[in-house]
Image (cartoon, grey):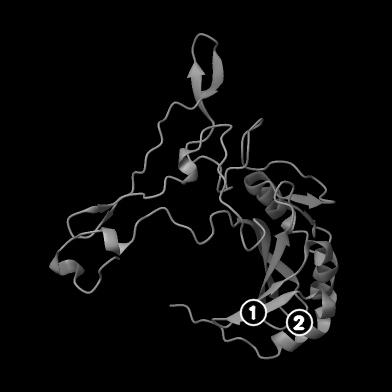
Amino acid sequence: MTVQQKLNPALKPALESTLGSLLVNLTQALDEITIEISAGNWFAAANLLASSPATAFNQCVDLCGMDYLEYGQSEWAGEESVSFSGYSRGVEPASSARLKFGEALDFGAQDRPRFAVVVHLLSYTHNWRLRVRIPCLDADAPVVPSVVNVWPTVNWFEREAFDLFGILFDDHPDMRRILTDYGFVGHPFRKDFPLIGHVEVRYDPEKNRVVYEPVSIEPRVLVPRVYRHDSRYIGHKGK
């Protein structure tokens, strides 16, 4: 059983004094602090967080990309359209699983940038943990500075975020894919990337090699919601 670490009250003033005007936003919830830094100031802020004795975030534990497309939206009907013997069906066919190659959907205006980089830092000196969010203002070409020179461990993390989300890291020493195949088209963790992919792979005995062909799977919604009128589920409706 793990015990949640209580938030040290000294962390917030240390962040505010160290970052100053570089700090765009600071939120505190569930004994955790999340700060937001603009992409243009991210490298400078990372240097301060790592080198300042007041914060001393020696380690970057994780770095990942975020895609907020369709954030807060759902294509599933709620409890109002579901009976104990019925199924909840998709009411708005907007899922990216239905996109075909070359198609695009308009999800309207969003109240936040579509892409962001999220970083989790650890201070061995103070035993503090911190979450940092860096929004990417340009959805067509999301770019943030690389912090490999601050925390060398982020080298592969940044490559993963580039490979899976298409987020570029300026001044990265080796900005290339790390998980997908050579010649892979698109970025598979983006919300508008079709779940069935763009191509399928098979071995062709006549050509004596692996060939890529357009995907032949017909996308469908295969995860219904079922409410069972059963004593095992009394008190757990909708779970």
Of helix, strand and loop, which one carries label 1? strand
Which of the two residues, 124 or 48, is positioned nearer the viewer here?
Answer: 48
Q: Quadrant of the N terminus?
A: bottom left
Up the image or down, 21 lies above or below 143; here it is: below
On the image, numbered disc 2 is attached to which residue?
15
Question: Mark 1, mark 2: which one is toward the viewer?
Answer: 1
Please identify the residue farthest to the bottom as the structure is shown.
9
Residue 118: x and y in percent read: 66, 63
Which of the two residues, 92 or 21, is positioned nearer the viewer here?
Answer: 92
Up the image or down, 79 lies above or below 215; here it is: below
Of the numbered discs 1 and 2, the one sitting upstream in the chain is 2
Q: Residue at x 54, y 32 (%)?
A: 198
Give the class, few, some or many, for how many residues have Cα within 10 Å of label 1's Cα (few <14, many ≥20).
Answer: few
Residue 205 visible in the shown view: yes
What's the residue type where badge 2 is placed? Answer: Leu
Of helix, strand and loop, which one carries label 2? helix
